[in-house]
Structures are given as structure tokens and as C-alpha cells.
Amino acid sequence: MFGLGWLEIGALIVIALLVFGPEKLPEAASQAGKTLRNLRRMANNARDDLRAGLPPELSNFDPADLNPRNFVRKHLLDDLEDDWNGQPRQLEPVTAPPVPDPVDELGYGELPPYDSEAT
């Protein structure tokens, strides 16, 4: 839970007992639970409002994809994982644009333009 071990959680409980006292600790824990529920509800409402305001072409948008860790995992590491698992990627062939032939542009037997000041 939040990267805390049993020793850290126990220390937090002891500190909470010392700060709030045994009579006010249940009330403080209840208030903290209500606050967390309200924050979670507000975050869910904001996410739903964001999705409702997006155009149809972005209907599969997930705000969690904006997290850099998720972005890297989704766009970079999935390809590596597929390679590792033996699923070959289908690469699209790369074709270079055609290069015009300078002889065709001038025509057969025609001399290229000569600029005497350029030499």
C-alpha cells in the first residue's frame, strides 16, 4: 500500500494515536475516509466530463495514457515485448520516391545550360 511496509504503517498509527488521542482517532479516520471518497468522486467526474467533451474520433482516449510511464510502455515497450515473445512485427516496406533522370529533362542531344560567370 503506497510503498509502505508494516513497520511504517505501524509507526504512522502510533503517531496518529499520539497526535489525535484515542478518543478522536476514529473521528479523524472517518473524516479522512470521507475526504478520500470525495476526491475520488471528483476525479471520476472530471474524467467523465473530459470524455463527454471530446469529439467522436477521440472516443477511445484514456487520460492515463498521458502519464509518461504509460506512454512509454504503450508505444515503445509493447513492440519489444512482442519481439521477445516471438510475435514478429509486420513492417511496412519503405520505398524511396522516384529520382528524375537529368538526361530525360534535357532531352537527347541537348546541352546543359552553361554559365560563364559561375566558373
Image: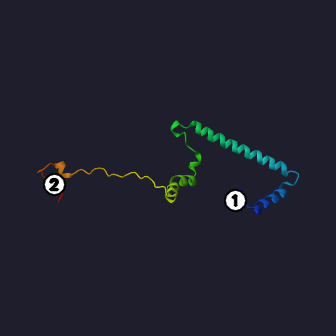
Task: Report which residue position mark 2 lands on.
Answer: 115
Q: Which mark is residue 29?
A: none
Residue that mark 1 sits on: 3
Which of disc 2 and disc 1 is earlier in sequence?
Answer: 1
Q: Position of residue 8 (x, y in %)?
A: 76, 61
Q: Secondary structure at mark 1?
A: loop
Instruction: Tell me if 107 is positioned left or right of 59 in this view.
Output: left
Colour pattern: rainbow
Front in this rendered view, residue 1 or 119: 1
Circle 2 packing at 10 Å, graded few (<14), some (14-19), many (20+), is few
Q: Secondary structure at mark 2?
A: loop
The residue mark sitting in front, 1 or 2, is: 1
- Classify the position of the N terminus by image quarter: bottom right
On the rendered structure, is 33 left or right of 61?
right
Q: Name the amino acid type tagged 1.
A: Gly
Q: Does the residue at mark 1 contact the one at mark 2 (Cβ under 8 Å)?
A: no
Question: In whole angstroms, how far apart are the C-alphas of marks 1 and 2?
Answer: 75 Å
Q: Position of residue 19 (x, y in %)?
A: 83, 56
* Residue type (three-letter) at the residue carrying disc 2: Asp
Quadrant of the snapshot with the C terminus = bottom left
Instruction: Write down the quadrant of residue 62 in the picture.
Output: top right
Which residue occupies 17% across, 52% down?
103
